[in-house]
Every structure is written in C-alpha cells, then in structure tokens.
Amino acid sequence: MDKNKIQILVIDDDVAVLDCVRLSLQNIGPYQVSVCENPAEALELLRTNSFATVISDVNMPGISGLDILESVSQIDSKIPVILITGNTEPDTMRRAIHLGVYEFLKKPFEMSDLAVTVKQAVETNRLKIQNEQYRNHLETLVQQRTIELFAAKSKLERSYLNTIHAMVNAMEVNDIYTRGHSERVTAIAMRLGKLLQLNIDELRQLRIGALLHDLGKIGIISGVLNKEQSLTESEYDSIKQHPIIGAKIIDPIGLPDTISKIILQHHEWANGEGYPYGIMLDDIHPLSRIVSVADSFDAMTSQRPYRRNVEYSKAAEEVANNLERQFDPTVGKLFFDNQRQVLSVLKDKDALKDLLQEAF
Ligand SMILES: [Fe+2]
C-alpha cells in the first residue's frame, strides 16, 4: 500500500463495477483503491489494513453489505461506509442507518456523485481521526496533570506533617518527661481509630489532633511541667489551661474544627469531672474520646517526676475500671479488649513511623 495515498476499499461481487469504480476514483484524487469481489476476503483486508472509506454493494452472496457495515463499525467506527444498492427497501435502509451507514448510492449512479460522496467521506474520516487524536492527547495531558497534582499534594501534606512534628518537638523540648508522648498517643489513637473503622478524613484529623493535643504545654512554665515535688493548687490550675492554650495557638492556622476540639477536650471526663470545662460524655467530640484513652494510658506507663510508671497491663486495667467515669465505654473497652494488637505499634519502630507519616 502506498502510504502517501488515501486508501479506499471497494467490495462488490460484480467485477465490472469494481473496475469501473477503481479507475474512476484513481483518476480524480490521491486515492489508492483496493477492490474485492469476495466479502469474506474483504473483512480480512479490513482487519489487517487501514482504510479511509469503504464502498460496498448491499446484495452479495453469503455476506451482505449490511454485514460488512456492521463489521466495519466494530473494527473501526471512524471508517465511513458508502452502500451501493439497487434495493431501497425501507427495512434495509432502516437497518443500514441503525448501523451507521455514511451514505447510500442507488444503482445506477453517476461517477461524479460517487466522487463527491467519497471526497466528503474521506474528509469525515480525517476529522474523526484528528478528533480522536486530540481527545487522546487531552486524556494523556489530564492523566499527567493528575499525577503531578497528586505528587504536589502529597509533598504539601508531608511538609504540613513535618511542620506539625516540628511544633510537637518545640513543645516537648520544654517538657523533658513527656518526650515522645505525643507520637505514642498518636500511634495508639490511630490504631483505635482504625479498629473503629473511621474514614480517611477522620483518621487524618485524629492524627493531627493527637500529635498536637498537648501543644498548649508550650505556654506552661517549664519549672511547673518538670517539677519533681507535688504541684500546688495554683500550679495545677495553670497546667489545666494547656488545652485552651493549645486550641488558641492553632486557631490562626485554620485547621478543621475537629482538631481544635481534640486539643480542647482531651482531659474532659465522661462524668463531667474533667477539665477545662467539665463537660459530659455526649458533649465530648468522639475523636477526643479516643485521644483521651490513648493519652491517659501513655501518661500512666511513662515515668513522671512525681511518680513511677506502671506496667502496660495494669494501665489497661485502669482504663477498663474507669469506663463511664472517665472514658467513653465503647472506646475504653475496645482498647482493653485489643490492647496487645493496639500496643504492638509502640514496640515496632517501622510501624510507628508508618502510622505517623502514612499518606491517605
Ligand atoms: Fe494533656
């Protein structure tokens, strides 16, 4: 096949028609005309070659022009099919239109009519190919941009998380006894969150809220935070301000309200005896209830200046003994029942890192 010429396929069981059409078309345009008197062979040609237009007789033995039309639409719907027929029965016409025929030429036809129809059909084919290429190009472009956008979003999220970790580090520098506390609380809270089948947005908010839950301690005098003797009442009152201070610090950042609630309510108790506001369980945000369990557990199992740490199992029992009094019963019981699974993350540095950096 000459690739510089426009490829046309003509199918007709009448050899005289084939010769006539071939010679006429080749004389009037840059066409290379393949002819085929056997429709089965024509289908094979269609599968293995690329044609700009197909001209086919309708009534042929074995495979009809309508069958050819149907096959062409399946092989490449961009190829226009011109049907030549002496049969203009409505049923045939209707079926051909349904199958997407480009044009009918009624026998006998003028070669000049065929020439015009072929020229228009070839142009239609060219435009369809151009349109498809443009669409494919656009789709590729959209895919590339989507990948770039996701990469940029992921980079931004990582940078955002790193900033949060930097804020946590700044806070923990001030409080030598709770170093690593925020990350451990986050890991436990995230494990609980996954057991509770939280959605991706909730897990994201839980992670940031848990990491920042004690941020307000940055505003507490380090002498009070690190005091080895019992705290005076006024010192304890100042520590009780850290949830409010933390929520105020993050306020200008514009984080979701849920994160502010986690920070503000992580010391509230189910029975209303917590601080800073003494609200009851139903008014405590569900994500804050998770952080509360994780925070209390880690506080009990960490060494503090004023007391020794307790074993994991004893601390988990303490949580179970304070359901409804201090903790949300559902969250506290879930933690107690799954303590081995939840706490395994604290011993596995890779799992801990993954949970803290996981991109959702
Ligand atoms: Fe706290």
Image (cartoon, rainbow, N blue to C red):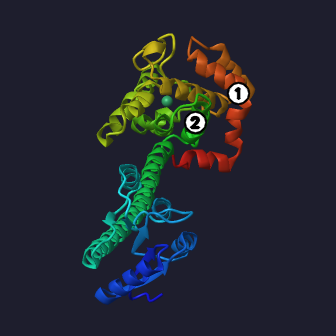
- Horizontally, is 276 left or right of 40 in the view? left
User: What amino acid is found at the position of numbered circle 1 in the picture?
Assistant: Asn
Residue at (28, 72) in percent of width and height: 117
Sequence-wise first label, 2 or 1: 2
Name the residue type under label 2.
Answer: Met
Q: Nearer the viewer, residue 22 or 311?
A: 22
Please provide percent x and percent y for residue 149.
Answer: 40, 58
Q: Is mark 1 within 8 Å of ligand 1?
A: no
> Residue 261 in the image: x percent, y percent?
40, 28
Between 335 and 322, which is closer to the camera in this rendering? 335
Vertical relation: 92 (above or below) 119: above
**Front one among 359 and 182:** 359
* CA neighbours of label 2 inside 10 A, class few (<14), some (14 to 19), many (20+): many
Asked if 252 appears above or below 6 in the picture, the reply is above
Question: How dense is the environment of label 1, judged by Cα within 10 Å: few (below 14), some, or many (20 and up)?
Answer: some
Q: Nearer the viewer, residue 83 or 200?
A: 83
- Are the residues tagged 2 and 1 within 8 Å (C-beta)? no
Q: Is residue 110 visible?
A: yes
> Is 181 left, or right, of 132 in this rendering?
right
**Residue 190 bears which disc, if any?**
2
Q: Is mark 2 within 8 Å of ligand 1?
A: no
Q: Quadrant of residue 106?
A: bottom left
- Determine the CA span between mark 2 and mark 1: 13 Å
How many badges with numbers are in the image? 2
In the displayed structure, would residue 341 be above or below residue 132?
above
Question: Which x, y percent locates residue 312?
Answer: 72, 29
Q: Secondary structure at mark 2?
A: helix
Q: Secondary structure at mark 1?
A: loop
Residue at the disc numbered 1? 338
